[in-house]
Image: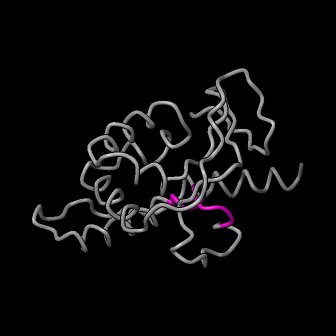
Amino acid sequence: MHCRFILLLLVMLTLFVGCTGSSQQPSHIERSTDVERGRYVVEIMGCNDCHTPDYMGSGSSLPEKDWLVGGDLGFHGSWGTAYPTNLRLLLNGISEDDWLILARRMRQSSPMSWVRLPKVTDQDLRAVYRFVKYLGPKGTQAPARLPAGVMPTTDYLEFPEPH
């Protein structure tokens, strides 16, 4: 129980503390620069903290080839239980425009909606998409999301209601 509380505090701290970078960049950016921008956005937004297993415990030293493969630690709250999606499989299976639509929808019903995701520009979301496509598909699907009122059978962190 004590370890879960500490882990919850670490997750909350990671979600609520961080830097924000400028999202202004010229429209003529080359693809390689988009990939670099996507890597940067993934890092400053803390995407790896949840979407890369053992990332926080590794001191952020996991190689990039292991990033964003999702996980089975649930985040449980009034919305149900959300699991970190394997972004490597998801984004390699949809178009860039579909990613923008999905990212906007994710903002409405998950812990991500509370902190940084609402502030991400379409330009930065496109850069994230291009970075994940650059990484290529890897790993397995995360468990399916559970609706409100259904308790997870996996390990999970209890999330408080947003303020």
53 is within the stretch colored magenta: yes
Give coordinates of residue 83: x percent, y percent.
63, 43
Residue at x 37% of width, y 61% of height: 133
Report the span colored magenta.
Answer: 46-54
Query: In this image, 116 relative to 71: left or right?
Result: left
Query: In this image, 134 relative to 30: left or right?
Result: right
Residue at x 51% of width, y 74% of height: 64
Residue 116 vertical position relative to residue 25 in the rendered view, above or below: above
Q: Nearer the viewer, residue 98 or 3?
A: 98
Q: Which image quadrant is residue 139 in? A: bottom right
Query: In this image, 120 relative to 136: left or right?
Result: left
Query: Which residue appears farthest toward the top when viewing the image?
Result: 149
Give coordinates of residue 100: x percent, y percent.
31, 43
Residue 152 vertical position relative to residue 11 in the rendered view, above or below: above
Query: In this image, 140 relative to 18: left or right?
Result: right
Q: How is the image coloured?
A: one colour
Residue at x 85% of width, y 56% of height: 3
